[in-house]
């Protein structure tokens, strides 16, 4: 589902995606499930908590992208880049539900 701006001449994105609403725990599980798909990062995982922002960010998300990545050894550069990409993609798909 998308939201369309009323004024097509107004600058900025014309279509904004509607995000799925999830709990912080569910979002953390989703992040880790996505990370598990990368075999060379099987010793890494995101740790919480997922923090709600006081005000929505410019991109519309209501949670902080600063989620720690922990690996059994040192965090490899490849895994750090994959984790950043997962967080970036997830910010466009999910928001935290309003219940605290």
Image (spheres, rainbow, N blue to C red):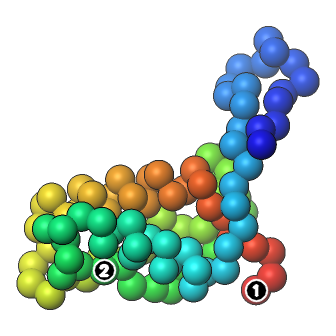
Q: Position of residue 36 (x, y in %)?
A: 30, 72
Q: Which mark is residue 8?
A: none
Work out whether 72 lies above or below 98: below
Work out whether 67 lies above or below 100: above
Give the CA distance from mark 1 to mark 2. 24 Å
Relative placement, left or right, of 46 versus 28 is: left
**Residue with the most extreme top position:** 9
Where, by quadrant of the figure, is residue 31 drawn?
A: bottom left
Residue drawn at the location 81% of the way across and 37% of the way down = 3
Residue 38 vs residue 61, the one in the foreground: 38
Relative placement, left or right, of 43 versus 17 is: left
Q: Quadrant of the C terminus?
A: bottom right
Q: Position of residue 89 (x, y in %)?
A: 47, 52
Q: How many marks?
A: 2
Residue denoted by label 1:
100
Q: Residues within 10 Å of mark 1 (few under 14, many from 20)?
A: few
Camera sees residue 34: yes
Where, by quadrant of the figure, is residue 96 drawn?
A: bottom right
Relative placement, left or right, of 17 versus 47 is: right
Residue drawn at the location 15% of the way across and 58% of the way down = 78
Work out whether 97 lies above or below 8: below
Q: Position of residue 33 (x, y in %)?
A: 40, 73
Indicate the secondary structure of the residue bearing disc 2: strand
Q: Which mark is residue 45?
A: 2
Q: Nearer the viewer, mark 1 or mark 2?
A: 2
Q: Position of residue 61 (x, y in %)?
A: 64, 57
Where, by quadrant of the figure, is residue 91 drawn?
A: bottom right
């Amino acid at each position: 589902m998308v939201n369309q701006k009323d004024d097509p001449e107004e600058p900025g994105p014309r279509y904004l995606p509607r995000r799925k609403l999830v709990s912080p725990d569910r979002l953390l599980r989703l992040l880790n499930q996505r990370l598990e798909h990368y075999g060379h990062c099987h010793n890494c995982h995101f740790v919480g908590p997922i923090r709600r922002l006081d005000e929505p960010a410019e991109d519309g998300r209501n949670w902080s992208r600063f989620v720690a990545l922990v690996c059994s050894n040192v965090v490899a550069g490849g895994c750090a880049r994959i984790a950043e990409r997962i967080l970036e993609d997830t910010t466009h798909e999910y928001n935290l539900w309003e219940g605290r």
